[in-house]
Amino acid sequence: MSDFIFPQWTNRLKEIGGVLGAGGGLYAVVLVWLGFAPKTITVGYEPEQPIPYSHKLHVGELGIDCRYCHTTVDKAAFAAIPPTQTCMNCHDKIRTESELLKPLREAHAAGLPVEWRKVHDLPDYAYFNHSSHVNKGVGCAECHGRVDTMEVVGIVSELSMGWCLDCHRDPAPRLRPLDKITDLDWEPEEDRRELGERLMEEFDVHTQVSCSTCHR
């Protein structure tokens, strides 16, 4: 039996396969890196809530301050979710027959909280304290965006390690006076950096980039 001889050009297949293999590996790395980046998997996330609460209406049009509902945002690590009674302070007199608010009325009557779905959920290994940021001049809009324009609240910032470090390395342009913390459409009347550098001194703000700052 004579030997089966492949055409000479087939000798190139090994080299071609090696190039494709390396390229395929690189493609896989890039795909995972981009596909699972915080900006890809979190930004734009808008969970459906049990009650279609409009921040655009309540905050933007009615002017309700963030701290009316999120009462602990300047006092504790977590920004409290309002109990049903906070909602009923108005809605026991306003839109009392609204079908959309039926879950609210039922929860209040049963003494139960509304099962709001969390929008921003940092991993357990990352420590974040709302009050320490708020009381040092970091406004709500820096992380949460213009909530006063949102019909449905979603994630607008990456909340990744790199994103946080950008601010921790250079906090000045992100700071504002304390009386403007919840003023979501506030714009400074002077250079933002110059104002921020003054506020860093006033609030005793320093760059914080050590691992233990966020990982405790």
Image (cartoon, helix red, strand yellow):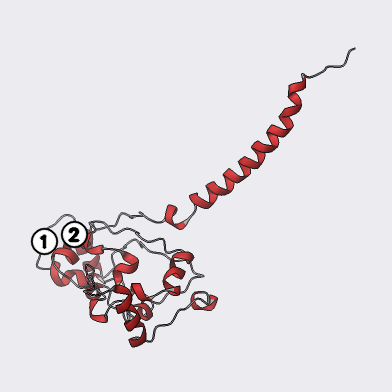
In the picture shown, does residue 167 fall above or below 44? below
* Callout 2: SS: loop
> Is there any visible trace of residue 73 in the rendered image?
no
Answer yes or no: do the residues labelled 1 and 2 have beta carbons within 8 Å? yes
Residue beneath disc 2: 101
Residue 113 percent across, percent down from the top left: 29, 68
* Callout 1: SS: loop
Residue 178 percent across, percent down from the top left: 27, 81
Q: Amino acid at mark 2?
A: Leu
Image quarter hosting the N terminus: top right
Residue beneath disc 1: 95
Relative depth, front residue between 78 and 35 = 35
Left-right relation of 137 to 60: right
Residue 152 percent across, percent down from the top left: 26, 56
Q: Which mark is residue 165?
A: none
Where residue 3 sits, quadrant-wise, is: top right
Relative depth, front residue between 157 and 42 = 157
In the picture shown, does residue 11 fall above or below 154? above
Residue at 52% x, 74% y is 215
> Is there any visible trace of residue 103 in the rendered image?
yes
Relative depth, front residue between 189 and 123 = 189
Residue at 47% x, 78% y is 208
Residue at 53% x, 52% y is 33
Q: Residue furthest right?
A: 1
Q: Residue furthest left?
A: 93
In the picture shown, does residue 204 fall above or below 81? below
